[in-house]
Image (spheres, coloured by chain):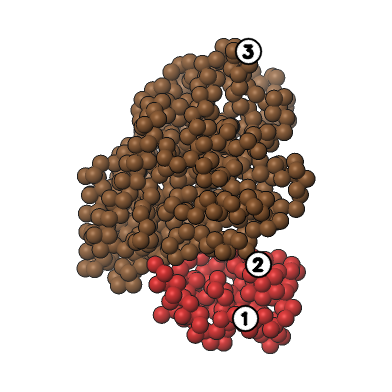
Chain colours: A brown, B red
Amino acid sequence: MKSEATIFERSRTNRAAGAQVPEAGSLADIPSRFLRESAPLLPEVSELQAIRHYTNLSHQNFAIDRNFYPLGSCTMKYNPRGTHRAASQPGFLNRHPLTPVGVSQGTLECLFELQEILTIVTGMDAVSLAPMAGAQGELAGLLMIRAYHQSRGDEDRDEIIVPTAAHGTNPATATMCGYKATEIRVGADGDVDLDHLRQLVGPKTAGIMLTNPSTCAVFERQIVEMSQIVHDAGGLLYYDGANLNAILGKVCPGDMGFDVLHLNLHKTFATPHGGGGPGAGPVAVNGRLVPFLPIPIVGQRNGQFEWFGEEEIPKTIGTLSAFMGNVGILIRALAYSMMLGRNGMNRVADFATLNANYLAMELERAGFKLAYPTRKATHEFLITLDEEAKQFGVRAMDFAKRLLDFDIHAPTTYFPLLVPECFLIEPTETETKEQLDEFVKAMMQIRAEAETDPRMLTEAPHHQFKKRLDEVKAARELDLVWKPDSD
Amino acid sequence: MTNAPSDVKYTNTHEWARIDEDQRVVVGISDYAQNALGDVVYVELPEIGIEVSASQEAGVVESVKAASDIYAPVSGSIVAANEELENAPELLNTDPYGDGWIFVIQPHDTGELNALLDAESYVEFCESEDEGH
């Protein structure tokens, strides 16, 4: 492998890529208190060195464009090239956020159409595209729930209910919004414990946050009853859209009784994912929350598309970014939606669930244990490697590391934690049967190794550019900033 | 099987509670819990002086796998927290019932301890949790 020197270590004084050096501008109009006293610490390398450095780094990436990536609950699906091409047109790319609406009608129309499509596909009444990620969508959603209760003078509701197996962002968002997160139990079949829900709800309940299909990878069958219980208690229902892939075009969260939801466009609508974004987490709401939507929203007035802000939506929870979310991502999601069309969206759910169920059955046939064997898989499913751990002394993490040697990204491990030694596996709709069979074969071989030569697992990966990393040291002695005097 | 000494009581959220000579309640997480969590990398301790009620969150344990809340086994006020854990969170793995204690509660009513599980019932509970999947 290439030497792992950082770009700073390659630096030599006064070496520079001449062609790339910007013209020295005047600093005269910058107040002196904003000027730094010493030059920033930047690597001084040639253009070719910089190119090689980043190209070599990019080869170390594990990407869906290179290999199978069955990361449960994250929906790492293929991003069709056509959507990139559509969004890369100069009219979109070169548009400054402050361009007047009169000459931005094309972009605004795209955003308007995406709002309409997402409104229909979720079965809600209105959408704001403003949130820049799923977590920000969650924040916006709960802020709207809070604004709703406050607008009714219903000030005492300070609890948000989340299932024990919820995505960690759910209780985090509740806490961030000043709510107390209370946990509701999940039964042995993966459904929420309804009796426990009945005990928990009351005049303190602001709402409940649910993912459906749930984080246990099964469809919450009692959702309509749950909705009734929470609404009867005066609370609202929040839908975490992380797992929408399984039901896209089939079931609307609006029909299940949800009042507000966020979508992860970087999951369900095939926009780029991973590496920290850019994400997009639009929120959709039903009538009672429309007045509180985050701004801006694209509206129509006198035959022209316009940004609607505080003037049109006076009770809004406000803005979430300097301009309008990640517009380039939103354009990709629109292109994806239009490429699929109404029937295509159905087929996403059909094949996402077919692939997951096929893979689940094949793994079960190969002797692996499903966490919820009586339930159908949704777009993903859970297996538990508890038996293998007890028998061979290898853990789910060792299986995960060994899978890397087969050029397969490990599924989500140890989530949800209530299933011991688990893998949450999500193949997505864009994989072939052959690829799924390869995965089963790899898992069988790894289990055979666990029996005969467990070090193949416990010391894995063997064929990657890095061997097993010390995760404990990394977490306890986090050190991310290079300093000139450090070794 | 899991190590569950009989001189402490247990919760079904995997904390242990031991009454000390001053009638205070020392709290930690069980061997079963530390094993399920894996290597602990961070412990968030409760503030000294705060009031907690039984089953209320009083701290957080973070491992390479997950972050988990620690619940107070009984109601009372927090009178001590194990600051050693800030530098050596691994004590939860190496000595969960000893040096890996997390905090101490001055209980309102030591009788609340009676509601907790004894070692035998706790081991049974852990086994049933395992069989759930």
Disc 3: which residue: A302
Which amino acid type is shown beneath numbered disc 3? Asn
x, y percentage for residue A385?
34, 64
Asked whether the residues under the numbered discs 1 and 2 touch, taking CB atoms below 8 Å apart as contact, a structural biologist would say no
CA separation in Å, label 2 and label 3: 56 Å
State the residue in front, A73 or A463: A73
State the residue in front, B36 or B63: B36
Q: For this view, does A247 lie left or right of residue A106?
A: left
Of labels 1 and 2, earlier in sequence is: 2
Disc 2: which residue: B56
Mark 1: give few (<14), some (14-19) or many (20+) Cα within 10 Å: few
CA separation in Å, label 1 and label 2: 15 Å
Tag shown at residue B115: 1
CA separation in Å, label 3 and label 1: 69 Å
Q: Secondary structure at mark 3?
A: loop
* Residue A268 visible at all: yes
So how many labels did they put on this image?
3
Tag shown at residue A435: none
Q: Residue at x 31, y 46 (%)?
A: A354
